[in-house]
C-alpha cells in the first residue's frame, strides 16, 4: 500500500531518507527465531483465517499519528483551514481503512475514492468561500497520502480555490517545498511530523516531543511548525501508526481483544510474533510489547513491516500476532 514504513523507533528518532520512515528498514529474510526475551507458559499457537483484527493498544504503547493538514503559513487563511478541517471532521480510522481498501484492494483511483467519500459524508456542505487563487496540494509517495490529498482538493475546490494535486515523494522532498510555499498543503501525521521537525531543528539525537496523548503531540507539532513557517489544521480521528493484528479466528479462540489480553493469555512458547527484522530491538515493536505489556512471545518470525509477508503469515496460520499499520485496507471487515 505504501512506500514508507512507520515502525518504531523510540518516540520516533531518526527519520530516514525514505520519507515516512520511522525506523523500519527494508523487509528481512523470512525465518523464525527465538526472541531475546525468554517466554514461559504454553502461549497461543497461530490460528489461520481470512479476516484480520487489530488488538487495542490499551496502555498506549504507540504515539499519536493522527492525520492532520499541514499548510504553508502564508497560505493558512481561516477559510482555507476551515475547508481542510471539514475533511478532518469526517475522517476516522475505520473510514480511512475503507478508503485504503477502495484504492489498494478494489483498485479505484484515489480521485474516485475521494470523491465518493466526500459525497457519502457531506464533506463540502457548509464550506465557506475563501479568497480564491491557486493551491497546490502535495502528496507523498504512497496511496493513502494521495487519497487524502484528493480529499483536500475537493474541499478546497468547494471553498473557491483552483487546486492541483502533485505527487512529490518523501517528506525530505516535500517538507522544504511546503516551507518555501512551492506547495501550500500536504496531508501529514502528527507524531511523525513533530519528530521530523524536531530532529531537523535539533539534531538526530534530540529528545522526542511526540506523545501517546494527542493534545501534547499537536502542541509540540504546532510549536515546531511555527519556527518552520508551517501551520497545521485540526487533527482527524484517523490514525496510521504501528498496530498489532491477529486473525479474527485467533481472537475468538483465545478471547483476546487488547494487547493486555494478549500478554495475559498468550505469553508463552507457542506464540509466534511476526514483523520486520529490527522489531525485537524497537521500543514501538517487540521491545515495547515486553516493556509496556510484559508480553513474551515464544518465537519471532522475521518478515516485513506491515506488508504482505506478515499479513500472509497471519492468514495462513504461520504467525500468532504481527505488526501491521492501523489504517491498512486489509483490516476492512469482510
Image: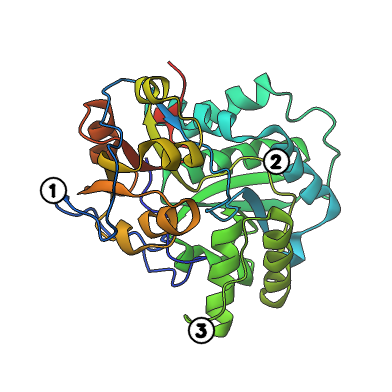
Image x and y of residue 203, in percent: 51, 84
Q: Is residue 226 visible?
A: yes
- Is residue 100 shown left or right of residue 299? right
Q: Is residue 67 above or below residue 216?
A: above
Are there few (<14), some (14-19), or many (20+) residues within 10 Å of tag 1?
A: few
Nearer to us in this view, 26 or 286: 286
Mark nearer the viewer, 1 or 2: 1
* Colouring used for the render: rainbow
Q: Which residue is mark 3?
A: 203
Residue at figure coordinates x 57%, y 52% from the top left: 65
Q: Is residue 300 above or below residue 253?
A: below
Marks 1 and 2, Cα distance to the nearest angstrom?
41 Å
Where residue 143 sits, quadrant-wise, is top left
What numbered label is drawn on residue 88? Answer: 2
Mark nearer the viewer, 2 or 3: 3
Judged from the image, the secondary structure of the residue bearing numbered disc 1 is loop
Q: Is residue 230 visible?
A: no
What numbered label is drawn on residue 31? Answer: 1
Marks 3 and 1, Cα distance to the nearest angstrom?
35 Å
Q: Outermost residue toward the front?
A: 41
Nearer to us in this view, 139 or 309: 309
Judged from the image, the secondary structure of the residue bearing numbered disc 2 is helix
Are there few (<14), some (14-19), or many (20+) residues within 10 Å of tag 3?
A: few
Mark nearer the viewer, 3 or 1: 1
Image x and y of residue 49, in percent: 30, 20
Amino acid at each position: 500500500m505504501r512506500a514508507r514504513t512507520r515502525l518504531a523507533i523510540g518516540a520516533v528518532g531518526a527519520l530516514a531518507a525514505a520519507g515516512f520512515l520511522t525506523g523500519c528498514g527494508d523487509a528481512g529474510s523470512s525465518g523464525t527465531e527465538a526472541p531475546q526475551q525468554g517466554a514461559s507458559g504454553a502461549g497461543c499457537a497461530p490460528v489461520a483465517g481470512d479476516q484480520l483484527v487489530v488488538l487495542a493498544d490499551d496502555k498506549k504503547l504507540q504515539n499519536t499519528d493522527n492525520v492532520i493538514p499541514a499548510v504553508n503559513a502564508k497560505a493558512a487563511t481561516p477559510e482555507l483551514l476551515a475547508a481542510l478541517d471539514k475533511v478532518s471532521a469526517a475522517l476516522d480510522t475505520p473510514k480511512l481503512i475503507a478508503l485504503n481498501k477502495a484504492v489498494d484492494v478494489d483498485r479505484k483511483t484515489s480521485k474516485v475514492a475521494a470523491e465518493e467519500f466526500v459525497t457519502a459524508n457531506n464533506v463540502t456542505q457548509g464550506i465557506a468561500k475563501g479568497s480564491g487563487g491557486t493551491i497546490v496540494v502535495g502528496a507523498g509517495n504512497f496511496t493513502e497520502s494521495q487519497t487524502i490529498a484528493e480529499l483536500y482538493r475537493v474541499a478546497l475546490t468547494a471553498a473557491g480555490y483552483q487546486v492541483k494535486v502533485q505527487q512529490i515523494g518523501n517528506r525530505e522532498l516535500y517538507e522544504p517545498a511546503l516551507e518555501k510555499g512551492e506547495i501550500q498543503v500536504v496531508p501529514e501525521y502528527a507524531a511523525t511530523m513533530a519528530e521530523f521537525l524536531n530532529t531537523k531543528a535539533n539534531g538526530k539525537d534530540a529528545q522526542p516531543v511526540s506523545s501517546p496523548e494527542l493534545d501534547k503531540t499537536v502542541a509540540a507539532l504546532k510549536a515546531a511548525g511555527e519556527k518552520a513557517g508551517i501551520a497545521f489544521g485540526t487533527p482527524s480521528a484517523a490514525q496510521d501508526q504501528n498496530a498489532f493484528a491477529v486473525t479474527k479466528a485467533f481472537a475468538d479462540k483465545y478471547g483476546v481483544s487488547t494487547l493486555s489480553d494478549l500478554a495475559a493469555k498468550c505469553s508463552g512458547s507457542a506464540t509466534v510474533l511476526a514483523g520486520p527484522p529490527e522489531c525485537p530491538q524497537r521500543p514501538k515493536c517487540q521491545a515495547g510489547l515486553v516493556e509496556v505489556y510484559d508480553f513474551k512471545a515464544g518465537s519471532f518470525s522475521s518478515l516485513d513491516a506491515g506488508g504482505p509477508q506478515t499479513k500472509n503469515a497471519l492468514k495462513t496460520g504461520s504467525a500468532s500476532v504481527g505488526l501491521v499499520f492501523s489504517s491498512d485496507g486489509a483490516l476492512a471487515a469482510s
